[in-house]
Amino acid sequence: MKYNIDSLKLKYRRLVIITVLLLSLSFFYNVTDLFAQTIVVTVDLELNALPDEKREKLTNFKQILEDYLNNFKWTDDEFVGEFKINLNMLLQDISVSFEDRYKVQLLISNNSDVQYSDKRCRMEYQKGEIPNHSDNNWDSLTSLLDFFMNIIIGEEMDKYGHLLGSKYFERAKLIAEHARFGMGQFIDGWDLRVDLINYILGDANTKFREMKDFYFYGLYFAKDDPSKARTYCKEAINMLEEIIAKEDPKFKKCDKFIEAHYIEIVELFKNSVDRNVFEKMIKLDPSRENIYKELL
């Protein structure tokens, strides 16, 4: 299918808009602050399954993780603002005589339309250790954190430009490929993480990533130019229809996207004469059929 609007043009139009906005604001604010992007990660640890001795050893682990995640410059400031991430980790004790080891169920999300879970995580951590960032040191804890951080940042970056998240996905792929063969006792799960990142970067996921670019570019105009906003968002909905028809059930993303954004779609199109969007949403989101039918 050839889409009506060239995604590459979207990228450069958006860059022009952002550049003009930032240049205007630079007369009033420090330029460095304007271009700054802040990632704020909140870590929730579930330690109830651990024996008392292990819980005591992890007393400060939440703060240690948040320091590791929040005191590092993950991006090159491609977008402005605060990006909030939630990381939940449920730990179980699988220690051996010479070191503390943990089985981890991990859930990371942006509290909106992106969420990844992994129940096959294994890591070692000794009381008092302070994890450090290194491009050449593959560690059972930091490699896991860095892998999922780059994925969720890449997902967010795709909203700001055509496939803008690719370099973050490539970083995650590099981590996964090294970890797959270099983690020794902690190799469990890395084969599936390689599959995941290959899917994210593959052709089958490209249309979903491009759809996000159309959709969020449209939302940019929702207040000042609703007609233009509807043009781009409708194209995104058309793309969603095609994506869902071919979506790999192992990597379903469309349902989560619709769940997070259906209210925005309703608000954007409820005063439009074009009701075709709601007919399509009934097909794409049948669980909310009553909502869309009221607007037909």
Image (cartoon, grey):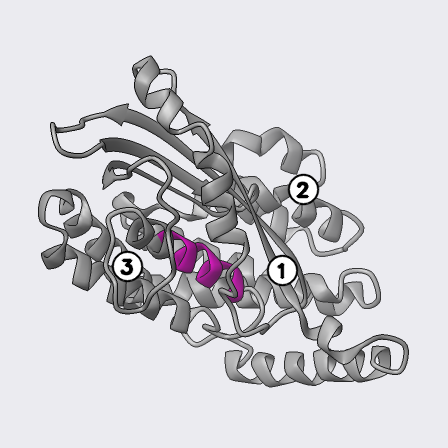
How many discs mark residues in the rendered view?
Answer: 3
Label 1: which residue? Answer: 38
**Percent of width and height locating residue 290:** 62, 29
Q: Which mark is residue 263?
A: 2
Which one is closest to the eye, mark 1 or mark 3? Answer: 1
| Cα–Cα gap, marks 1 and 3 | 24 Å
| Quadrant of the rendered image containing residue 205 | bottom left
Region rendered in magenta: 148-158
Q: Earlier in the sequence, mark 1 or mark 3?
A: 1
Crowd rating for badge 3 (residues with CA inside 10 Å; few <14, some 14–19, many 20+): many
Element type where label 2 sits in the image: helix
- Which of the pair 292/89 is nearer the observer? 89
Expressed as whole percent of the image width and height from the top left, the position of residue 16 reads 70, 85
Residue 79, image x and y in percent? 62, 70
Check if mark 1's residue and mark 3's residue have beta carbons within 8 Å: no
User: How far from the left and from the top, in percent, is residue 295?
Assistant: 72, 40
Say which residue appears at 54% left-offset and 61% top-offset: 236
Q: CA distance from mark 1 to mark 2?
A: 27 Å
Please identify the dominant SS of the magenta region.
helix
Whether the magenta-drawn stretch holds residue 149 is answered as yes
Sequence-first tag of 2 and 3: 3
Q: Is residue 147 magenta?
A: no
Q: Earlier in the sequence, mark 1 or mark 2?
A: 1
Q: Residue at x 76, y 61 (%)?
A: 222
Query: Does 290 sit above or below residue 2?
Result: above
